[in-house]
Image (tube, helix red, strand yellow):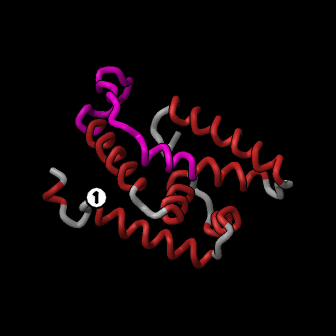
Amino acid sequence: MRILGSIPDAEDVAQETFAEAYRLHRLEPIQSWTGLLVRLCTFRALDALRRRRPTVELLIEDCASHSQPIDTMVAAELASRLRQSVSSLPEQQAAVFVLTCYEQWSRDEIAVHLGITPESVSTSLYKARKQLANLLNLYNPGELS
């Protein structure tokens, strides 16, 4: 849900994840169900994000919020741009970024679940953040307004 921003899309990804996990289980024994499910779910969510078509956004009036409308609109726009930008990252960088920033996993947890070294996690996260900063034009705030 945090990656896709949509409950129906997240439900679809969950269904795909469990179906794929079952297929893998039939081929060979699974050593870590948690690791398998997290990895499959993350990658399937990123795949769904990459193939997403433009959809109709909810109107601001449809949302119940205590913040100012302009703050909500800015946050929604930034969240949308971030999701689009994450989908353009290489698969490992995107997975590391999502697991770090959205799921708040530690570097060691990510390393174990993705089957890479903790140093690779740090390097991937650094590269992902740098590329996202460039994609979102954070160093040129004049272009955001």
Residue at image position (13%, 58%) is 142
Write the start and end of the magenta stretch as one range.
43-71
Where is residue 116 shown, x and y percent of the image? 65, 72
Give the quarter of the image for residue 115.
bottom right
Up the image or down, 57 lies above or below 87; here it is above
Mark 1, Cα crowd under 10 Å, few <14 / some 14-19 / many 20+, is some
Name which residue type carries label 1: Leu
Left or right relative to 43: residue 130 = left
Query: Extreme top residue here?
Result: 62
Left or right relative to 12: residue 94 = left
Query: Extreme front residue here?
Result: 27
Give the quarter of the image for residue 134.
bottom left
Where is residue 77 shown, x and y percent of the image? 29, 43
Which residue is label 1 attached to?
136
Q: Secondary structure at mark 1?
A: loop
Where is residue 61 shown, x and y percent of the image? 29, 21
Up the image or down, 120 lies above or below 4; here it is below
Left or right relative to 93: residue 15 = right
Based on the picture, tell me whether residue 28 belongs to the magenta stretch: no
- What number of labels is visible? 1
